[in-house]
């Protein structure tokens, strides 16, 4: 069994794979930059217990991370609790992805992993949208090369900035309002945050296709993708396990 871990700025996603690549479970915990390896080990143990997974059945683990300060801590947590080898996605690891940007070393490991899975699962050219703390759009051309992308402010970050910098706007749940034209403050905020982001995705994918000169498959993943993509006018495929699938593929390409 393989334990796959994606460390994001806000959340950490845990997933376990059977030998045939089947995802046995997925779980999400908060990213805590000051947590110790013992505290993370306890969280991993809780996730495995909830899903009735025997830690002794886990032979290997792989981590991708955009939070360097947490990477080593979580790696130690896995070693302490499970005692297996831990592979970390970083420069020099075999991914099979051609990265055609100015400095390939600057590309976040999460975007690399998303692209690896996207190329394997979907037709190219391809736009991969990852909706986390930031919303990113990664562009893969018809030769399956990563040619660049877009970074936008994430939905939750926009909401937090709006609430923290105003005196009377409340925190809201991320659920679509019944109407675009809100009748109260909460509905107005929901419309502005959710539909505006949906319009941004529609507009950015259209402009990317214009620049490429051809239509693209568009797939979305990440914490709020399931909320935003149904509000988009164009077809956007939802794949909540895209990054976990990419971790599995990279592990297979690098195992001895």
Image: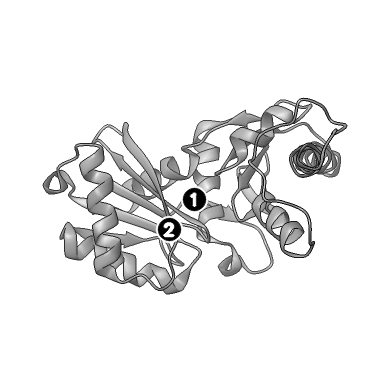
Instruction: Tell how many labels.
Output: 2
Q: Quadrant of the N terminus?
A: top left
Q: Position of residue 123 (x, y in %)?
A: 61, 30
What residue does disc 2 label? 64
**Left or right of 12, for residue 202:** right
Residue for point 42% across, 43% down: 244
Q: Position of residue 88 (x, y in %)?
A: 36, 62
Nearer the observer, 99 or 113: 113
Kindly check if marks 2 and 1 are in contact, taking CB atoms under 8 A apart as contact.
yes
Crowding around mark 1 (Cα neighbors within 10 Å: few <14, some 14 to 19, many 20+) is: many
For the residues labelled 2 and 1, the Cα–Cα distance comes to 8 Å
Tag of residue 113: 1
**Looking at the image, residue 187 lies above or below residue 75:** above
Residue at the outermost left position: 56
**Looking at the image, residue 243 lies above or below residue 107:** above
Q: Quadrant of the C terminus?
A: bottom left
- Sequence-wise, which precedes: disc 2 or disc 1? 2
**Left or right of 44, for residue 56:** left
Residue for point 52% across, 51% down: 97
Q: Quadrant of residue 134?
A: bottom right
**Looking at the image, residue 19 lies above or below residue 14:** above
Nearer the observer, 157 or 6: 157
Nearer the observer, 175 or 54: 175
Q: Position of residue 92 (x, y in %)?
A: 43, 66
Mark 1 secondary-structure assignment: helix
Q: Which of label 2 and label 1 is nearer to you?
A: 2
């Amino acid at each position: 069994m393989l334990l796959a871990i994606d460390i994001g700025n806000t959340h950490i996603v845990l997933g376990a794979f059977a030998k045939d690549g089947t995802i046995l479970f997925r779980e999400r915990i908060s990213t805590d930059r000051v947590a110790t390896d013992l505290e993370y080990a306890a969280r991993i143990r809780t996730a495995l217990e909830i899903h009735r997974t025997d830690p002794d059945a886990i032979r290997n683990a792989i981590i991708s991370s955009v939070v360097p300060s947490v990477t080593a801590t979580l790696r130690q947590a896995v070693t302490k609790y499970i005692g297996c080898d831990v592979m970390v996605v970083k420069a020099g690891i075999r991914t099979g992805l051609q990265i055609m940007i100015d400095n390939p070393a600057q590309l976040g490991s999460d975007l690399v992993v998303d692209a690896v899975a996207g190329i394997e699962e979907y037709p190219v050219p391809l736009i991969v949208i990852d909706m986390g703390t930031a919303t990113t759009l990664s562009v893969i051309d018809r030769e399956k090369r990563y040619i660049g992308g877009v970074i936008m402010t994430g939905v939750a970050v926009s909401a937090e900035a709006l609430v923290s910098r105003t005196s009377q706007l409340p925190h809201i749940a991320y659920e679509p309002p019944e109407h675009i034209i809100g009748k109260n403050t909460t509905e107005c905020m929901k419309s502005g945050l959710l539909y505006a982001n949906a319009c941004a995705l529609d507009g950015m994918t259209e402009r990317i296709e214009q620049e490429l000169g051809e239509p693209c498959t568009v797939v979305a993943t990440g914490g709020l993708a399931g909320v935003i993509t149904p509000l988009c006018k164009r077809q956007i495929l939802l794949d909540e396990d895209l990054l976990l699938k990419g971790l599995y593929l990279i592990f297979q390409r690098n195992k001895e």
